[in-house]
Image: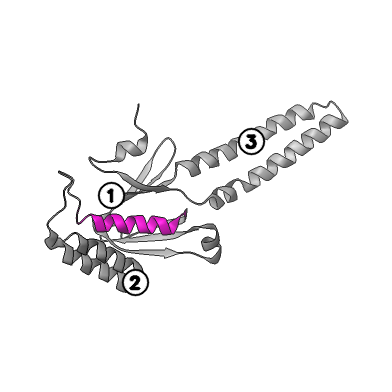
Amino acid sequence: MAKNYLEELLGKNERILLKTRQHWFILFSSIALEILLILIIVGAVITIAVITASPMVTLGLVLLLIPLVGMLRDIIIWYNRQYIVTNRRVIQISGVLSKDVVDSSLEKVNDVKMNQSVWGRMFDYGDVEILTASETGANTFKQIGDPVKFKTAMLDAKEQLGFDDDSGGEHRSTSDIPSQIEKLDELRKRGILTEEEFQRKKAELLAKM
């Protein structure tokens, strides 16, 4: 079976942990006008067809193709814009035929900010900003679905970087564990991890010693 585009981007032993897209609100806002135009044209065509067998019916059906094609285009663009967390990096892919790929190595991620409005908490969407030590500095994912799960998956993957050995799959020396706990404590102080998350992850690390 042929690989899809995302699978071709993955390195050896790199695996996908989470994949999401912008919330369906974004898609709906893009196609709302087109849906309205479709309803208006369909209503007009039905009305004309009932009243008289006018050539305007054919013209109306031709005009219907314009918002239909526009809506299909917006859906395809939305579907192909993906936000992915792997065990090594965060990837943003956009574009249909030509692709635009931006990725941030988890090793260079310094901080993660998440912003959810009241509506965002109700319908599970929000903005996630990744601050890195790379030249890009920051990368913001606007109104993505499942932002809390996305942020948690990214932090868990960053934490696991200290223990995964891609060449053999074995854990590194337990001497790394104190430094990992220090990093977790720093994330807790910044408010990225809650006290409960910190204590749980700390206990997991200590259990490996």
Give the farthest residue toward the right: 51
Q: Which residue is mark 3?
A: 66
Query: In the image, is 80 to the left or to the right of 56?
Result: left
Q: To which quarter of the image does residue 5 belong?
A: top left
Question: Is residue 28 a member of the stretch shown in magenta?
Answer: no
Determine the residue positioned at 55% across, 61% down: 122
Which residue sits at x=34%, y=31%?
Answer: 3
Dot 2 lies on which element?
Answer: helix
- Mark 3 or 2, closer to the camera: 2
Q: Residue furthest front?
A: 207
Point out the stretch of residues depicted in magenta. Answer: 145-163
Q: What's under tag 3, amino acid-wise?
A: Ile
Element class at badge 1: loop
The structure residue drawn at horizontal position 69% and vertical position 33%, both measured from the top left corner, is 63
- Mark 1: give few (<14), some (14-19) or many (20+) Cα within 10 Å: many
Answer yes or no: is residue 194 visible.
no
Q: Tell which circle, 3 or 1, labels the residue nearer the N-terminal end.
A: 3
Task: Count the marks.
Answer: 3
Q: Nearer the viewer, mark 1 or mark 2?
A: 2
Q: At label 2, which amino acid type do we have?
A: Glu
Q: Nearer the viewer, residue 63 or 206?
A: 206
**Left or right: 124, with 137 as reference point:** right
